[in-house]
Image: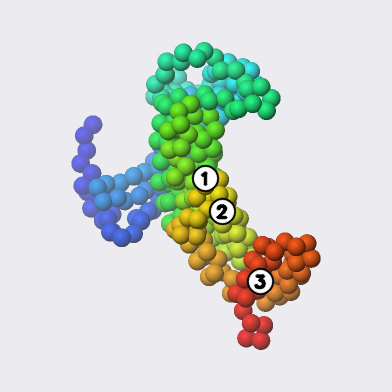
Amino acid sequence: MERDLSELLDEWPYESGKINVRLIQGADGEPRIQVRVDLGLLQMFAEGRPDGMTPHGYGSYLEYQEARLDQILQGGPDTPPPGPYASPDPEALAGPPEADDDEGPQQPPPEGGEAPRVLTPDDCRALREEALQYYHRYVALLVLEDYDGVIRDTTRNLRVLDLCRDHAREPHDQEALEQFRPYILMMRARALASQAIKDSEPKAAIHAIDEGLEALKRHFEETGRSEELEGSREHAALRSMREALVPKLPVSQKAELRQRLGEALASENYELAAILRDELRMLPDETG
């Protein structure tokens, strides 16, 4: 059936310079997320896979590949059983095209050995395409201030990065998504902090940001780019958010920080001591 969408698009004009998002109720009564883009409209399910598909009967292609890997690691066959959402609909069960496999069934690695490289280029392509759907949704969820949804989807996409890095056969597929890790880590930390602020927990918000900054530091160190950390946009965004939050901490927080500073100095943990000193300097003056 052919249908002109002009009337629908005219009802919701595109506004340049902002992310145009709204939450609507679908015909089935379930919520849908809509994003107005310059050339049209995106619509996604609010939960599950954004396009509503269930590859091989699983909630996502990631879940299918994780189940497959678990089975291989246990010495089982290469193909897991159909997932809990299995359907006779061939479109719902469609996965990426099967690649020729000359290596035969994968065997679990010996104890302490290298992780099995079981993901073909087609598997990785399907995982990347699916991750893009979740990216569109968690950006929209951030605008809608559904921070729990952002945490869920960013955590999920980090699993995709880990899976491809550790189990893809081709070096290109192992590295293709790593360039996005800092951004996903930043978005996740930002959502955790925003939810804490929403719950009137500024201390928990700062803790979430600090964990995000530490995760960014580990990533840049592990990839041999430590010198790029402080110049990255992700690091700058989290530091800026942290600096805006510090004045919201209760003044009584100073006593706790002083105690932790003394303990850090006593244990000769000078790196932590320097961080705590910075935090003390940024707290509001008790006499103010």
Amino acid identity at mark 2: Lys
Q: Is residue 137 above or below residue 163?
A: below
- N-terminal of the pair, mark 1 or mark 3, is 1
Residues 87 and 145: in front is 145
**Secondary structure at numbered mark 3:** helix
- Where residue 232 is drawn, which disc sits there? none
The image shows residue 67 at horizontal and vertical percentages of 57, 27
The reply to whether the C-beta atoms of the residues labelled 2 and 3 are less than 8 Å apart is no
Q: Is residue 288 above or below residue 272?
A: below
- Where residue 277 is drawn, which disc sits there? 3
- N-terminal of the pair, mark 2 or mark 3, is 2
Q: Does residue 217 appear to the left or right of 91 in the view shown?
A: right
**Secondary structure at numbered mark 2:** helix
Q: Quadrant of the N terminus?
A: top left
The image shows residue 220 at horizontal and vertical percentages of 52, 50
The image shows residue 56 at horizontal and vertical percentages of 48, 24
- Where residue 217 is drawn, which disc sits there? 2
Amino acid identity at mark 3: Arg
Between circles 1 and 2, the one closer to the viewer is 1
Q: Does residue 79 appear to the left or right of 143 in the view shown?
A: right
- Residue highlighted by disc 1: 223
